[in-house]
Amino acid sequence: MDSSKYVRYTPEQVEALERVYSECPKPSSLRRQQLIRECPILSNIEPKQIKVWFQNRRCREKQRKEASRLQTVNRKLSAMNKLLMEENDRLQKQVSHLVYENGYMRQQLQASGTTTDNSCESVVMNGQHQQQQNPTPQQPQRDANNPAGLLAIAEETLAEFLSKATGTAVDWVQMIGMKPGPDSIGIVAVSRNCSGVAARVCGLVSLEPTKVAEILKDRPSWYRDCRCIDVLSVIPTANAGTIELIYMQTYAPTTLAAARDFWTLRYTTSLEDGSLVICERSLTSSTGGPTGPPPSSFVRAEMLPSGFLIRPCEGGGSIIHIVDHIDLDAWSVPEVLRPLYESSKILAQKMTIAALHHIRQIAQETSGEIQCGGSRQPAVLRTFSQRLCRGFNDAVNGFADDGWSLMGSDGVEDVTIVINSSPNKFLGSQHNTSIFPTFGGVLCAKASMLLQNVPPALLVRFLREHRSEWADYGVDAYSAACLKASPYAVPCARPGGFPGSQVILPLAHTVEHEEFMEVVRLEGHAFSPEDVALARDMYILQLCSGIDENAVGACAQLVFAPIDESFADEAPLLPSGFRVIPLDPKSDGPAATRTLDLASTLEVGPGSTRPTSEANTNSDNLRSVLTIAFQFTFENHLRDNVAAMARQYVRSVVGSVQRVAMAIAPSRLSSQMGSKLLPHSPEALTLAQWICRSYRIYTGGELVHVDSQSGDAVLKQLWNHSDAIMCCSVKTNASPLFTFANQAGLDMLETTLVALQDIMLDKILDEAGRKILCSEFSKIMQQGFAYLPAGICISSMGRPVSYERAVAWKVLNDDDSHHCLAFVFVNWSFV
């Protein structure tokens, strides 16, 4: 045993060693050796003993870090356990309440069965008699100028909010897929059978209650649909709280319905247990209180008692209860859009969960858990994200008080054109307008359409990954030219296709990965002297959200804006993009296949009816509404030319999106192999067995190692294999097309199972790889397999991918006849 491990050091020697370690913690540092030599007190200690001391010191440091991490996890678990116990108590109260109501209904039914006079007249007369004996108490009118009356409204709002946050005032149902845990978003529930729509979330964050309250009060920072919020009056209360009268405007999610506004009272106070409460409700004629601003072009919505309960947590942090309960006046929108305004799940995703996501993001940025890439801080990237969303919302809504005005159409009401001649719309007040002397304004072309059987997340992911399927490179070049001092080098886009490739450069993402920002580089090539403007690379700042197919009620969105190479923090942004919002399948509507200018074919109001042929739709069909908006700058003398270009371009994009939607819709995919090979489908189970069996027959090795040869076990191992495994069809006189890939294969190609069907084998191989495959192809067909050397392939995003080696083999079906060709790329990585 090495006795040097048990050497005793003097305090002076320990202090010297600690000083050396703190300055040079790396064991192989030359600087450490120099410091040891320069320290006389360490000269009588053997180098081996010093090395052992540093090893022990490093172990102790790791133990302290691990102990600290475990303490943090333990605190989270304790807080979450407390939250679950409270939720369990609330559910028990709810069960007791339901049992009582059930018993009461039984008594009423039994009593009605023994009643001799059951006529309608008798029931009505009895009801009127009871109403006369027990009249409904009327809400007393509060004095609008009396703070005591506002305080009474605030206290009632507080009591009703707490009964929803921690009580049984609302019948809450947990959302599917939202399960609690130390690293989960929290407990998410939506309302059932209540007026309006409501959502509730409970979660744990590592911020103090006062900081959480400050963040939540800044609603525009986390609620993307908030256009503006004005605090018109602040009244202090005796208990160190405040009463605020607030007017808030929100954006409409589509071009087909008016935006909503709210006139509310917000009450901030502290409870006896140290909790902070921020509760809010609308002021109406029934509640009393001051009358708010007239709604003008907005529809006045009602916020029922809602708010935030923020409780301090032992050891730091906060437990948050968030309740949103609103009535959006769904009867004032077209019938087909009412699910957007009647869905508690959509409310939960857009408001309730978004608030908690934002707080968790700020908490992790504050604690240093998130390391931002590049030179930009997370707050700067969040600002870019907010500017993109706000610019896109402005374009979709086109408010007159922002300077937007409707432009005449060309006779076909499928695309709406609005213009804004204000210089600040694009340049902003901080930019010198003299740099753009011929600036005429901003033009927006927008349209909405109804989609059938297309998952929003899948469509937006396809649009992001395959820009060439819908974008026009000439239009992108025109948009990019608007950022230059002489911006109109391309005065009108010409149909030019998409001559360059796109490369996606990740920039940032949120903690829960529900949203990410990236820079897209469009590589340009000039094919003729007049195309010099198209030769330079272009850059697009892009924000993508909602592409998680498991997120119930989530809106999928792709918003982008051209930027220049400098990518300055205050650079002007002119966002365009797509927004796809799911419609609740329980509400059937017209099953239109082409629904441009959807508003002109819809009736508004509670009495609207539909033809029987239109109402005969399958309730299981997935429907969603797609909103498209593209913005362009223009010179005054070229306004009509740009308007014609924008209208034609949006129509072209709409046609492309419709073709994509038809291609990826499940009804169309059912006849294609790609859809049959979705994970866990019977076809995928069979193919997995064929792939592994053929690999074993030809190479003599095992592709996957499973205890059971059942299809489920084999497919699971194949799908989760670390190497990229792919299959492609082999047909005479046709390039091989990919038909299946495991998760690693999809990651390597940067695509999806559906989009995989459009990728040809020869397109992902470089020149050397194609030559090797051609030389080995006959060997593969005769011998059944071949080993391929290391090489480079190209992902669908244009990024090079290296691999150490590859194996190609024939896949045989149950009849031992050739089915397809399979590849496995070993130890692949992006270059």
Image: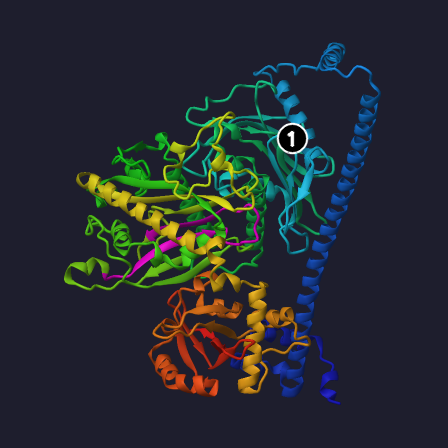
Highlighted range, magenta: 535-562
Amino acid type of the residue tagged 1 in the rendering:
Ala
Drawn side of residue 458 relative to residue 167, left or right: left
Closer to us: 189 or 730: 730
Drawn side of residue 628 relative to residue 29, left or right: left
**Position in image of residue 736 (x %, y %):** 40, 72
- Is residue 794 in sight in this rendering? yes
How dense is the environment of label 1, judged by Cα within 10 Å: few (below 14), some, or many (20 and up)? few
Q: Residue at x 40, y 62 (%)?
A: 505
Quadrant where the N terminus sits is bottom right
**Position in image of residue 522 (x %, y %):** 32, 60
Q: Secondary structure at mark 1?
A: loop
**Position in image of residue 76 (x %, y %):** 69, 54
Residue at mark 1: 240
Q: Is 550 included in the stretch rendered in magenta?
A: yes
* Residue lying at the far front of the rendered structure: 815
